[in-house]
Amino acid sequence: MCHYGKALEQGNFRHKEYLLKHLRKIYPLFFLSWLMAVLLKHNMQDFLYALPSLLLIQSWIPLHAVYFGGNAVAWFLSVLLASWLFLPLLYLIVRSRLGILVLLLLYSLYCYYISEDDINAWLYVFAPVRLVDFILGMWLRKFVENKVINTKESCCLFLLGTLCMVAAIWFYNDIEPHVRNAAIFWPSILMIIPTVSSLPPMLDKVMRQRYFVILGNYTLEIFLFHVIVFQMIAIIIRRNGLII
């Protein structure tokens, strides 16, 4: 983001090339997962609902059958595409402290007044709202760009952020729906990300272990196919009468 931020500020950002570069990375894999998901359902109605996701626009359509159509977890890619499309505009907000404050205020009011029945459609997956996460990510990257965090501070922040994340996951179902579908992981992420470049040697060594690196390189594949794999296992179990 540092590189793209400088390009945006200097007016030589090539938006089309940026979009194509990122789409080439994700779309072939996404299409394969979409096709597998549709074939597993083999239902014409499900197929029709899954069509918008081929264009990665499903998170803009507030219908459960659509935004979770095809490969349900791919709604995230729809939000990601929106963030790439609007990157120049989003960066303008990031550059302004007032813009960030106004954005957070509007976001808080939006979360507060939205009805509980509409949380999934209009808060959890709705692309324009989830762009707030992307904006905060860019702001955090810009904020820590020139900050120096010593090893002791880094270790404390990392451990505290990890504890916050574990607590958020543990108490997830007990947390108020508007919070758990919006900003539940913000505190932990805001503490963990700035520490990545200055982790204590021992912790850094652990995170650089071969298995962690391999998992890190295949996070998109795991993310896109994990539900499909579970569905295939369930089908195999049912067809072979393995359920007692």
Image (tube, helix red, strand yellow):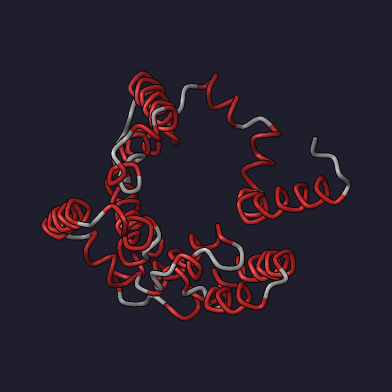
Left-right relation of 8 to 48 = left
Residue displayed at 47% across by 81% down? 16
* Viewer-nearest residue: 227 or 84: 227
Left-right relation of 31 to 16 = right
Image coordinates of residue 61 in percent, x first then y, are: 41, 73
* Viewer-nearest residue: 209 or 121: 121
User: With respect to residue 22, does 231 lie above or below?
Assistant: above
User: With respect to residue 6, does 43 lie above or below?
Assistant: below
| Residue 154 sits in quarter | top left
* Viewer-nearest residue: 58 or 102: 58
Residue displayed at 33% across by 40% down? 184
Image coordinates of residue 72 in percent, x first then y, are: 56, 60
Image coordinates of residue 83 in percent, x first then y, are: 39, 66
| Residue 1 sits in quarter | bottom left
Report the residue that reaches farthest toward the right. Answer: 240
Left-right relation of 120 to 39 = left
Dividing the image into 4 quarters, which one contains the C terminus?
top right
User: With respect to residue 237, does 93 lie above or below?
Assistant: below
Residue displayed at 63% across by 76% down? 47
Residue displayed at 37% across by 39% down? 189
Image coordinates of residue 146 in percent, x first then y, are: 29, 43
User: With respect to residue 111, does 172 lie above or below?
Assistant: above
